[in-house]
Amino acid sequence: MSEALVFASPFSLLFDPLSHEFMRRALMVSALVGGVCGLLSCYMTLKGWALMGDAVSHSVMPGVVIAYALGIPFSIGAFVFGVGSVALIGFVKQKSRVKEDTVIGLVFTGFFALGLVLVSKIKSNIDLMHILFGSPLGISQSDVNQTLIISLIVVIILLLFRRDLMLYCFDATHARSIGINTSLLHYLLLSVLSLSAVVGLQTVGIILVVAMLITPGATAYLLTDRFDRMTLLAICSSAISSIVGVYVSYWFDIETGGSIVLVQTIIFLIAFMFAPKYGILKSKSSIPF
């Protein structure tokens, strides 16, 4: 692919991959998943839940393995273990003196190790690399349907509770003082996080899904102070980076999930350097001499 890339025209670079059914499917699913994860990432960034996102994304692995072994949709097993990991984190935190970040690290590494053990012992056609790093180029139609349904559920929940979730992520104490049920929002947001982690498995896998849940929101956070603009920027940057990442993986024959996350990281670094208000170059120029 890379040799043909040198002599290809911009038109062929853009449209030749679309002649393949698997590429059209991968582009559609990756853009959808990128947009959904980008929307949620705004709440994750404001709430400071990067480590929680990492925990949930790794904790779903045993659920995926068990679901495949039982012949049921992997999303069911992944969601159950994702929510279960959150419940276990809350239980251990309340019943012990161990701090939350330590509990999160203990739970997600334990669940992840359990998943690795199950992969090695349960006889199935499970591809460990597919679970860890995703495979949007080989996604089946049934997986596409699952992704569409779960993505729709996530978007509906985030839109219905948009204002309450925004206030909860900005200032949970104030939200509680005006009568908002912050406990409900806490577990609702964690449930949506689990669903989004399931969705992200198709494109970037367990290892890299946390980047899709954090990087777009962090990028948009550097570019604007308004939440509405932040969500729009995060969705657009995540969807575009997913599309570009799929194209790059096709033409250079590299791993797709890593390509998508690498593009997202590059976009973040550009914002980090050149953001009009919060970029480091802007900050330096505003220092009085």
Image (tube, rainbow, N blue to C red):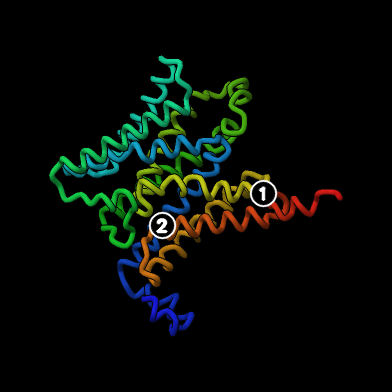
Reading the chain from its start, which is encountered first: label 1 or label 2?
1
Q: Residue at x 30, y 40 (%)?
A: 61
Residue 222, percent from left and from top: 64, 49
Type of amino acid at the residue the image marks with label 2: Gly
Q: Quadrant of residue 167?
A: top right
Inter-mark Cα distance, 1 to 2: 27 Å
Please name the residue shown 33% across and 58% down the image: 136
Q: Is residue 44 left or right of residue 111?
A: right
281 vs 190, nearest the viewer = 281
Q: Tag 2, which secondary structure?
A: helix
Q: Position of residue 194 (x, y in %)?
A: 39, 38
Residue at figure coordinates x 27%, y 58% from the top left: 141
Q: Is residue 154 left or right of residue 174?
A: left
Residue at numbered disc 1: 224
Q: Neighbour class for label 2 at 10 Å: few (<14), some, many (≥20)?
A: many
Task: Looking at this view, name the residue that lies furthest to the front.
Answer: 289
Q: Nearer the viewer, residue 200 or 261?
A: 261
Q: Which percent across, then down, holds residue 125?
A: 16, 51
Residue extending furthest toward the left: 123
Q: In this figure, which residue is indicated by the disc labeled 2? A: 258
| Spot occupied by residue 156 in the image (x, y as percentages of width and height) | 45, 42
